[in-house]
Each structure stands twice: as structure tokens, then as C-alpha cells.
């Protein structure tokens, strides 16, 4: 399984092209507030082509691209784009399935419940919405709806802060990682106490936030040696060294495979067949609430 992909469907693309302000798509040039214009490769979002890259027996979860900032738009602008994304995403062929999205200007749990009942795998939220107590309070009803449906939350980087004329890699390497780091610790401080049964997965190994536990303890925090079995991290954009370090801190049971396709490929873990089976199959099934696969003995 791959819990982290992006696939822009025709309705979603059309909605971005109708806009006159970021986020908008001019032909295949993407314009965002905090990043340089980006030339999108049309083949990356060709559904038939993307399906041909996947094994028919796999499961690939696609998500709205939160760095675009759609979820943060005023409701009148965000809802039509998100509705277009949901309509097309629900019609994607195998092996695709989708994370739901939500408008943060109007976080409606009833709308989310409807999306989940239609077959969405869970809810994706941008890390930029989950950086402090106020952020978690704002989405508390959504997280309650997820818990009631026994479906997970996926935390993904949100829009990057403007960085002037810096290098093109800066948002992905600095901004996104900082967001995920902050969201990881904000969830521990504010999210988990309020939502003890919620399963959650943090993209890109939570920006390697789990590796800072020693500093957390040194500054008065706690948690060393205690692993939350309902809090997962996925592997996108990292490789064997980072994955190994996180497994040493959290154990293998909460690490799941994610690629961030089409922007990257699923990393090799270098941890051996048993760990790969856990990360690619067993752990994602627990994250999604799917039954375990029976094994012959």
C-alpha cells in the first residue's frame, strides 16, 4: 500500500484554471502565494497513465495537494474546488482511493460524515491548521467525526510561507519540514488528550520530529520509551538512514509506506523483508482500519 499520492483529476484541474488568484493553474503553470511558478507535467495527472504504474492488487491513497492552500481559502472559494476533487476522486479506478478534504473556513462535520460514508479513506488536514491549541480546537468536531467512523487523519504539509527569491527547494526542505515538526508536537500536547482513540498519520516521517525526543526530555517533556500505537508516520521523501533512525525511536509498527507520487517514488527501507512487509502491508492496514491478512503457518 501507498498512503500518500497526489492525482489531479479533470474537475479539480478545471476548478484551479477558473481562478484568477493563487492557487491557480494557467495552462499547466501552477501559481502559489509562497512558491515560484511550477510547470506541471500533464502525464503526472493522466489517470490511465498513473493507474498503469500501480499493481492492480495494491492500494494507493490520493490526496488533495494541501500546499496549494485550497483548504485555507474562504468557504465560497474552497468548497467548489473541494467538491470537484471529491466527485472525481470517488470515481477513480482501482487501485486508487482518496483522502477527504475540508474547508477550514467552515469545518463542517456533517459534510465530512457524508464524504466518509461515500467511501473516503479518512480526512487529510494541512499541518498549518494544526500548529497549536486553537487549531485543534477549531477542527475538534471533524476529529470527533473521524473517531466515530473509525477512520484516520492524515496530516500533510500546508502552504509554504513566502521566502522571497530563495532556492526552489526551500519550501519543501525547510518550510514543510518545520510545519510537520510543529504539528507532531502540537498533536501530542493538544490533539491526543482530546481524541484518545483517533488514528493519525503524519507525512514525511513528521519532519523527523520523533528524533527530537531526547531534547524534549531535556527541556522538561516526557514520553521517551512510550510509543503511541495509534500515531503513525509515513516515509515519503526520506530514505534508509532516516527511516532506520525513526524505527529505532518509534519501532517499526507505526511506520507506513508513502511515496508522494508523482513528486517522488516510494523509498527503499533497507531494513529487510519482514520490516518491508510491516511497512508496506501490515501497518497501513491497521492505520486504515482494514482487517489483517491471514497468513498460513
Image: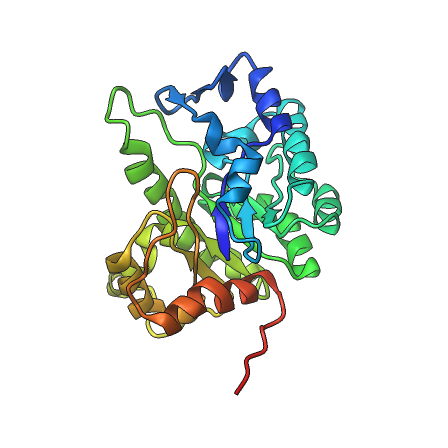
State the image quarter where residue 185 is shown.
bottom left
Extreme residue toward the top, this view: 20
**Looking at the picture, how far across and down is residue 204, in whole percent?**
38, 50
In the rendered picture of this protein, how many numbered marks are placed on residues?
0
State the image quarter where residue 244 is shown.
bottom left
Task: Say whether residue 78 is left or right of residue 264.
Answer: right
Task: Say whether residue 199 is left or right of residue 237.
Answer: right
Of the pair 47 and 77, the residue shown nearer to us: 47
Of the pair 141 and 231, the residue shown nearer to us: 231
**Residue drawn at the location 28% of the way across and 32% of the way down:** 169
Q: Does the rendering let one see residue 79?
A: yes
How did the renderer colour the structure?
rainbow
Q: Is residue 197 depicted above or below 27 in this figure?
A: below
**Residue drawn at the location 34% of the way across and 50% of the way down:** 207
**Looking at the picture, how far across and down is residue 103, in whole percent?**
62, 34
Q: Is residue 207 depicted above or below 108 in this figure?
A: below
**Residue drawn at the location 59% of the way across and 31% of the way down:** 9
**Residue drawn at the location 31% of the way across and 60% of the way down:** 243
Extreme residue toward the bottom, this view: 297
Q: Does the rendering let one see residue 223?
A: no
**Looking at the picture, how far across and down is residue 282, in whole percent?**
50, 69
**Looking at the picture, how far across and down is residue 239, in whole percent?**
29, 54
Amino acid at each position: 500500500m501507498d498512503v500518500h499520492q497526489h492525482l489531479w483529476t479533470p474537475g479539480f484541474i478545471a476548478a484551479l484554471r477558473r481562478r484568477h488568484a493563487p492557487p491557480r493553474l494557467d495552462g499547466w503553470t501552477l501559481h502559489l502565494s509562497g512558491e515560484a511558478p511550477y510547470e506541471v507535467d500533464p502525464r503526472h495527472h493522466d489517470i490511465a497513465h498513473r493507474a498503469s504504474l500501480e499493481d492492480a492488487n495494491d492500494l494507493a491513497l490520493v490526496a488533495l495537494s494541501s500546499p496549494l492552500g485550497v483548504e485555507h481559502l474562504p468557504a465560497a472559494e474552497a468548497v467548489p474546488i473541494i467538491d470537484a476533487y471529491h466527485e472525481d476522486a470517488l470515481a477513480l479506478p482501482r487501485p486508487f482511493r482518496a483522502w477527504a478534504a475540508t474547508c477550514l473556513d467552515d469545518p463542517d462535520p456533517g459534510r465530512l460524515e457524508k464524504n466518509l460514508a461515500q467511501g473516503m479513506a479518512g480526512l487529510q488536514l494541512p499541518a498549518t491548521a494544526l500548529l497549536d491549541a486553537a487549531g485543534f480546537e477549531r477542527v475538534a468536531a471533524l476529529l470527533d467525526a473521524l473517531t466515530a467512523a473509525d477512520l484516520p487523519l492524515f496530516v500533510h504539509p500546508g502552504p509554504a510561507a513566502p521566502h522571497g527569491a530563495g532556492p526552489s527547494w526551500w519550501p519543501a526542505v525547510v518550510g514543510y519540514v518545520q510545519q510537520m515538526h510543529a504539528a507532531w508536537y502540537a498533536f501530542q500536547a493538544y490533539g491526543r488528550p482530546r481524541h484518545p482513540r483517533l488514528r493519525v498519520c503524519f507525512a514525511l516521517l513528521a519532519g523527523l520530529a520523533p528524533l527530537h525526543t531526547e531534547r524534549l526530555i531535556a527541556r522538561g517533556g516526557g514520553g521517551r520509551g512510550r510509543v503511541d500505537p495509534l500515531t503513525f508516520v509515513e516515509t515519503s521523501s526520506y530514505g534508509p538512514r532516516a527511516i532506520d533512525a525513526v524505527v529505532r525511536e518509534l519501532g517499526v509498527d507505526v511506520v507506513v509506506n508513502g511515496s508522494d507520487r508523482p513528486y517522488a517514488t516510494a523509498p527503499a527501507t533497507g531494513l529487510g523483508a519482514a520490516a518491508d512487509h510491516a511497512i508496506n502491508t501490515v501497518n497501513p492496514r491497521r492505520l486504515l482500519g482494514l482487517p489483517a491478512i491471514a497468513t498460513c503457518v
